[in-house]
Amino acid sequence: MQAFDTDVRNRIIKLVKGILEQNSLPADVTPSAKLVDVGLTSMDMVNLMLGVEAEFDFTIPQSEITPENFLSVETLERMVTTQLQPATAA
């Protein structure tokens, strides 16, 4: 399971870095860094949400689209892993 979690984290970091690069914002994206602190705007958060849905091929339930889940790479990773768990357990 550790490899799966690491893969999820790396894919989310790649998405965040891609959005920052589009905005010409160089940033060191660490798992615990707050996404707003590294430079993501509210529009970037929407793009990140859509990117996560496309990257992991699932729709984020409305109840999971919260500021808490989009606080950092770690919180986003936790939400994605939780959403994907039933699919991988089956």
Image (cartoon, rainbow, N blue to C red):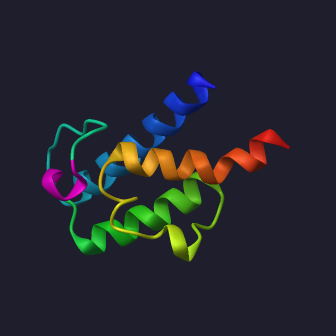
Q: Quadrant of the N terminus?
A: top right
Is residue 77 rendered to the left or right of residue 73?
A: right
Is residue 7 rendered to the left or right of residue 30?
A: right
Whole-percent x and y of residue 78? 48, 46
Which of the 4 image quarters holds residue 44?
bottom left
The image shows residue 69, relative to residue 9, as above or below, that is below
Which of the 4 image quarters holds residue 53?
bottom right
Whole-percent x and y of residue 77? 46, 45
| Number of marks drawn | 0
Q: Most extreme residue toward the right, as rendered? A: 90
Q: Majority secondary structure of the magenta segment? A: helix
Q: 56 or 90: which is nearer to us?
A: 90
Which residue appears at 19% of the width and 60% of the height?
23
Whole-percent x and y of residue 25? 14, 52
Magenta residues (range): 34-38
Whole-percent x and y of residue 42? 25, 73
The image shows residue 52, relative to residue 75, as above or below, that is below
Which residue appears at 79% of the width and 40% of the height?
89
The image shows residue 54, relative to residue 21, as above or below, that is below
Q: 8 or 19: which is nearer to us?
A: 8
Which of the 4 image quarters holds residue 35?
bottom left
Is residue 25 rendered to the left or right of residue 12?
A: left
